[in-house]
Amino acid sequence: MSMEKVVIGLSGGVDSSVAAYLLKEEGYEVIGVFMINWKESTGTLTSGCTWEDDVTFAEMIAKKLDIPFHVVDLSDFYRKRVVDYMFTEYEKGRTPNPDVLCNREIKFDLFMEKAMELGAAYVATGHYCRREIVDIEWKRYYRLLAGTDPNKDQSYFLCQLNQDQLSKSLFPVGHLLKPEVREIARQQGLITAERKDSQGICFVGKVDLPVFLQQKLAAKKGNVIEIDASFMKKRALPLLPENFAKLCAPFPYKPWNGKVIGEHNGAHFYTIGQRKGLNIGGYEKPLFVLATDVIRNIIYVGEGQDHPGLFRRGLFIPKEDIHWVRPDYAMSENQEREFLIRIRYRQPLEKGIITMKPEGAYILFSEEQRGITSGQFAALYLDDELIGSGVIR
């Protein structure tokens, strides 16, 4: 039986509660720590699920399991490293993923530092993913594997972790299905057994994004321009090497490509594929955002969820934004390799070929992808192992 010290991030939810129980059963010396990362309510829709509620549940779990409990306030760091990054990205017309940033910058960086100060050998979380150790040619590697539950796999959110972070990480519920986790919680009389899963941005909750962003980004009226489907069909490019870069880039819409059909309050408040918030009627099918231009303050929209402007064959990741979870798989210039790729959480894995060029990675998918969005993370898998990731441009 191990008596190594583990700090578990107790969030007040069922997953981290069961993770703490399982660690204790395995013989670890477990310390529960609750992170305060967000204290404000501006723009948030979350009701009855504030951090004050969560910390109460977390403390009750710690008492039930008879483990020490601490609260650490990381809200200043969260604002600087996650929220300020969000504002900057939206201002540039990109759509960031704060949950990925939260894991890289907060849970597995600052929080991990605090855990090590408490003498911990590991940090554990309730993420649905798995870690495996392999030794290749006398070198040790830590594999980040998808969670066993296909409906709850959260490996995507950890796509920016590195080998050092993984070497100190444990994911006790990654091999379980969600119903099994709830059943363990019920059997052990844990108060979180039936508690609903949190939703929305990591530690912030559900957000009214325009209201949230208006804390820093000013509203500014601009044109909504409709792009007809026939315009896009005429400009479709054949799959030839000379079209590679264009196929992997967003279409460069211009104001004269379509017609003005309304106004909006700021292009940076919208994201590709968005349907709600346009408030323009008179169409048989819903309108969807195809692109945003924050320089000209224009939103380009198309009618119907099958509009060709919503689909792209490829994407590009700049060299400086490519991250290898497994550095031994890092690609060199002009190398090509097939991966399974995920461009957003819960999206099915899609086959694609990466070609590495001096400027970065070009990814061409076997099938066109809907709603590829600049600022999001593309995660690269081989079977169920997450190999690397990068920020889509």
Image (cartoon, rainbow, N blue to C red):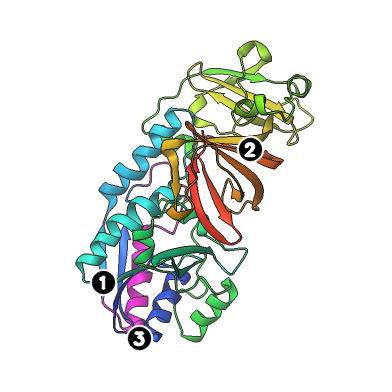
Tell whether label 1 touches label 2 (CB within 8 Å): no
Report how far apart the C-alphas of labels 3 and 2 lie in the structure: 46 Å
In terms of sequence position, does the residue under pointer 2 or pointer 1 come before the other? 1
Specify few, some or many for label 1: CA neighbours under 10 Å numbering under 14, 14-19, or 20 or more: many
Q: Quadrant of residue 166?
A: bottom left
Kind of residue at badge 2: Gly
Name the residue tied to disc 3.
Answer: 27
| Position of the N terminus by quadrant | bottom left
Q: Is residue 258 left or right of residue 193?
A: right
Report how far apart the C-alphas of labels 1 and 3 lie in the structure: 14 Å
Name of the residue lying farthest toward the top? 256
SS at circle 3: loop
Name the residue tied to disc 2.
Answer: 371
Q: Position of residue 287 (x, y in %)?
A: 69, 30
Specify few, some or many for label 3: CA neighbours under 10 Å numbering under 14, 14-19, or 20 or more: few
Report how far apart the C-alphas of labels 2 and 1 lie in the structure: 42 Å
Q: Quadrant of residue 171?
A: bottom left
From this viewpoint, is residue 273 visible?
no
Specify few, some or many for label 2: CA neighbours under 10 Å numbering under 14, 14-19, or 20 or more: some
From this viewpoint, is residue 98 visible?
yes
Q: Which mark is residue 120?
A: 1
Name the foreground residue: 373 vs 18.
373
What residue is at 38 percent from the left and 47 percent from the top? 41
Task: Find the magenta span and give its range.
Answer: 41-68
Q: Position of residue 66 (x, y in %)?
A: 31, 83
Q: Is residue 236 left or right of residue 70?
A: right
